[in-house]
Image (tube, rainbow, N blue to C red):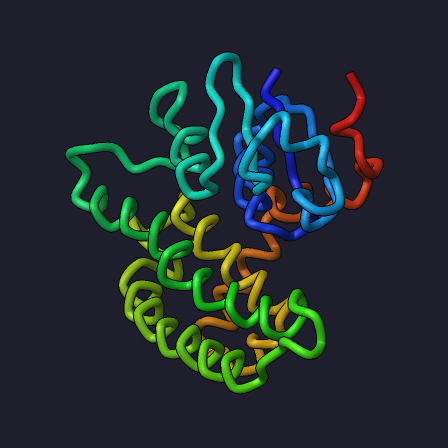
Amino acid sequence: MTTLYHCADARSFRALWALEELGVPYELKLLPFPPRVLAPDYLAENPLGTIPLLVDGATRMTESAAIVQYLVTRDGPSALSVEPGNPAYGDWLNGLHFGEATLTFPQTLVLRYTRLEPKERRNPQVAEDYGRWFNARLKGLEPRLAANDGWYCAGRFTGADISVGYALLLAETLGLDQRFSPAVAGYWARLQAREGFQKAKAAQADAPAATWQDG
């Protein structure tokens, strides 16, 4: 059984969404955020204290975009993968990392300096600067959507859309979605309408808190 250690709507949502899209059986262990502070026993599983943690037999992975790539290619080609030799393969790999390195990273600074730091250490100017950075980087998404029937690459929904889609979910959480262009807003609406996305949302809502402690 594949096991996913997860915090609601955190980066681990990428892995949860991929599992639901693929129909892979899994066990969900829901942690409070941030787990390294609120669930210290979790450090025995992942000394970094970060999420996600995917355990699949002897395989243990902690990078959300890499987990998506692993899941959608683990058993060979899937509807969410783009294979080497396909002209869209490079675009697909780029999308997996674009969602994390380019779109999610600046938002972590917004999150930190608006919500996670003690009030006396919060910095609205840093949050505003990185929020603008994030929205500027979204300009790179629009031509991809226009060229691929509304998806990131290959003219269809793939794991790259899961990676990018999580960045849009985080943007909504932080209120940055108010600056989405019509094209990006439409893309985000299509992603949320997917059955896999809705099942992932339901799974995290229904999971009992701290199930990671069982067994």
Q: Quadrant of the N terminus?
A: top right
Residue 93 x/y as whole percent: 28, 45
Residue 14 x/y as whole percent: 53, 45
Q: Answer with left or right where residue 189 lies relative to residue 143.
A: right
Residue 134 x/y as whole percent: 43, 73
- Residue 60 in view of the camera: yes
- Residue 203 in view of the camera: no
**185 vs 105, nearest the viewer:** 105
**126 vs 96, nearest the viewer:** 126
7, above or below 26, in the image: below
Residue at 43% in and 77% down: 135
Residue 190 x/y as whole percent: 54, 60
Q: Quadrant of the C terminus?
A: top right
Residue at 52% in and 72% down: 185
Residue at far front of view: 120
1, above or below 131, in the image: above
58, above or below 113, in the image: above
Quadrant in which residue 171 is drawn: bottom right
Q: Answer with left or right where residue 157 lies relative to residue 209.
A: left
Residue at 66% in and 43% down: 36
**8 vs 181, nearest the viewer:** 8
Quadrant in which residue 82 is drawn: top left
Residue at 31% in and 58% down: 148
